[in-house]
Image (spheres, helix red, strand yellow):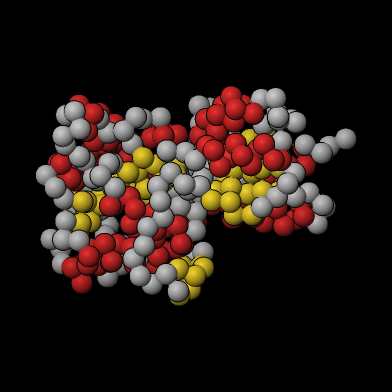
Amino acid sequence: MTIKSYAKAVNEAHEQLLASDERVFVIGQGVESPWCVGTTTLGLVARFGSERVIDTPISEAGVTGAAIGAAMAGMRPIVFHPRMDFMYLAMDQIINHCAHWYYMFGGRVNVPVTIRGIINRGNEQAAQHSQSPFAMYVHVPGLKVVCPASPYDAKGLLVAAVRDDNPVLYIDDRWLYTLEEEVPDEIYEVPLGKGRVCREGSDVTVVAVSYLVREAMKAADILASERISVEVIDPRTLKPLDIDLIVNSVKKTGRLVVADPDWPCCGFSEHVAAAVYSRTFNILKNPVQFVTLPDAPVPAGTSLEKAYFPDKSDIFQAVKHFFAE
C-alpha cells in the first residue's frame, strides 16, 4: 500500500492494464496534455508507444465508434473524453450502438469498451465545459455507469470496468484528482454494482455521488458535534445500483438525503428516491431531501460558481431540515 493521489491511481490503473493485457489500448484526444487529462495518462506513450496509447484528432463520434468496433473484434479499449460535455457528440455511438449490440446479436457479440468521461467543474469554464450528466447514461439499458469518489475506487473500478465484457461508462471528476489515500500497488478490482458505507450512523442516511462524498463526510463531522449521527453511502456504481445497501440503511435511520452533483429533473437523485420510496414508504420519518445542482446551466463567474456547486454546507442544511422545530 502506498499513499497515492486520485490522478496517480487512475494513471497506475492504465499502466497496469496495458502491461498485463495486450488487448487493452487507450485512445482519445490530449493523451499527454495536462489541460485535457491532468496527469492520469502521463507517461503512457513513452512506455507503451503510440500504437497502444493513441492521441487522436477532435472527432468524438469517430473515435468512440472506432473503439466500439475494436471491442467487438476482441480488443478492450479505453476511449476517453477529456470533457464529458462533448460526449454528446458521440451519443449515437454510445446509446444506439455499443449499449445495444450484445442484446441485438442475441448474446453472441460482446462489447467490452470502457468509455471514460472526465468532468471539469469550476475555473470559470461555463456551461459547455463543466457539465456532469450522469443520469443520461444511467437511463440507457445495456450500459454500466461507475463514478469513483476516492483514489482506491478510482483504480479498482477502472480495472473492473476494462475487464467487464459489457460497455462501462467510467466518470471521473478533476476536482478529486489531488485527493490522497492508501492504494494497493498491485492491480486489483472493485466489484461493479457494490456500494460502500463510508461512515456508519443512526439518524440520517446521506447517499452522495462523486466529489459530494467528501463533502458529505465533512458535513457528517460537523453534525456529529450537534449529536446528529449521519450514515454516508457512496454507491460507486450508479448502474447497476446497490439499492439493497441504501434501503437497509434507510430502514435503520428513517431519513434520506441524496447529494448528487447533477441537475435535479429526471436525475439520479430522483431515481434513488423513487427506489427507496417504493421499498420503505411506511418507514420514512420525513420526505427525502435533495442536494443537487440548480436547474440552470453552469455559470462562468467564480462567485456564481460558488453559489451553483453544492458543498458540505448544503448537505448540512438538508440534514438539519429534518430536525427543525
Residue 178, x across and y down, in percent: 49, 65
In the image: residue 263, left or right of residue 165:
right
Which residue reaches farthest right?
325
In front of the other: 119 or 181? 181
Residue 70 x/y as whole percent: 14, 46
Left or right of 19? Residue 323 is right
Residue at (22, 65) in percent of width and height: 20
- Where residue 307 sits, quadrant-wise, is top right
Question: Residue 96's image quarter?
Answer: top left
Q: Quadrant of residue 174?
A: bottom left
Number of marks in the rendered image: 0
Camera-nearest residue between 272 and 55:
272
Answer with left or right where residue 266 lies relative to residue 83. right
Q: Nearer the viewer, residue 193 or 34?
A: 193
Figure quadrant of the N terminus: bottom left
Residue drawn at x 82%, y 39% is: 323
Look at the image and tell me whether residue 31 can be seen: yes
Quadrant where the image shows the C terminus: top right
- The location of residue 269, given as percent across then percent down, is 55, 34
Visible residue check, residue 55: no
Q: Residue sitting at 64 percent across and 29 percent down? A: 280
Q: Position of residue 258 (x, y in %)?
A: 61, 38
Image point 16% across, 56% down: which residue? 23
